[in-house]
Image (tube, rainbow, N blue to C red):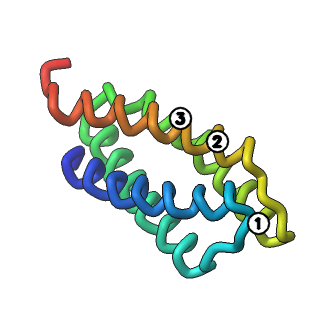
């Protein structure tokens, strides 16, 4: 499960960098691309939740962080729909996502942790 989640979040991270660059350049992004970013993130989140429900208690930290990251992402999407470029929110969303990704990678590659 965790390898699948890590793979999904790798795709999400690459897409997120491209979306963030658009925000910092002050230009619009494709809605379909943003929805794909969110959809793959939800897939990765589902895999992490399934791992937790399967008994992997290490990933509850990731689930807690994901709630905040998802909330920031939803807020960003509403602001982008209004034509705003919320750079601070994007930086917070991305920064927390990087932390969450690194924790997940550690748990994925260190099963005894």
Q: Which is nearer the eye, 104 or 29?
A: 29
Q: Which residue is mark 3?
A: 65
Q: How many marks?
A: 3
Please tell me which of labels 3 and 1 falls first in the chain.
3
Place of residue 109 in the rendered image (x, y in percent of width and height, measured from the top left): 16, 32
Place of residue 10 in the rendered image (x, y in percent of width and height, measured from the top left): 33, 53
Place of residue 58 in the rendered image (x, y in percent of width and height, measured from the top left): 32, 26
Q: Which is nearer the eye, 66 or 83?
A: 83
* Mark 3 or 1: the one toward you: 1
* Mark 3 or 2: the one toward you: 2
Q: Which residue is mark 1?
A: 80
Please tell me which of labels 1 and 2 falls first in the chain.
1
| Label 1: element kind | helix
**Mark 3 surroundings: few (<14), some (14-19) or many (≥20) residues within 10 A:** some
**Mark 2 surroundings: few (<14), some (14-19) or many (≥20) residues within 10 A:** few
Looking at the image, which residue is at 39% across and 61% down?
43
| Label 2: element kind | helix
Q: Quadrant of the C terminus?
A: top left
**Real-space Cα separation, disc 3 to disc 1, in angstroms:** 22 Å
Residue 34, picture quadrant: bottom right
Q: Is residue 93 above or below residue 36?
A: above
Looking at the image, which residue is at 53% across and 33% down?
64
**Real-space Cα separation, disc 1 to disc 2, in angstroms:** 14 Å
Place of residue 41 in the rendered image (x, y in percent of width and height, measured from the top left): 45, 58
Looking at the image, which residue is at 73% across and 48% down?
87
Q: Which residue is mark 2?
A: 91
**Real-space Cα separation, disc 3 to disc 2, in angstroms:** 15 Å
| Label 3: element kind | helix
Q: Are marks 1 and 2 in contact (CB under 8 Å)?
A: no
Looking at the image, which residue is at 74% across and 42% down?
88
Please tell me which of labels 3 and 2 falls first in the chain.
3
């Amino acid at each position: 499960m965790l390898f699948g989640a890590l793979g999904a979040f790798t795709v999400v991270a690459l897409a997120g960098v491209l979306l963030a660059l658009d925000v910092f350049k002050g230009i619009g992004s494709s809605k379909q691309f943003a929805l794909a970013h969110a959809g793959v993130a939800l897939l990765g989140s589902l895999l992490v939740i399934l791992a937790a429900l399967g008994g992997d208690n290490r990933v509850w930290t990731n689930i807690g962080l994901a709630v905040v990251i998802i909330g920031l992402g939803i807020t960003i999407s509403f602001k982008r729909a209004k034509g705003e470029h919320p750079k601070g929110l994007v930086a917070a969303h991305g920064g927390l996502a990087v932390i969450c990704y690194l924790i997940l990678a550690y748990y994925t590659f260190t099963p005894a942790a």
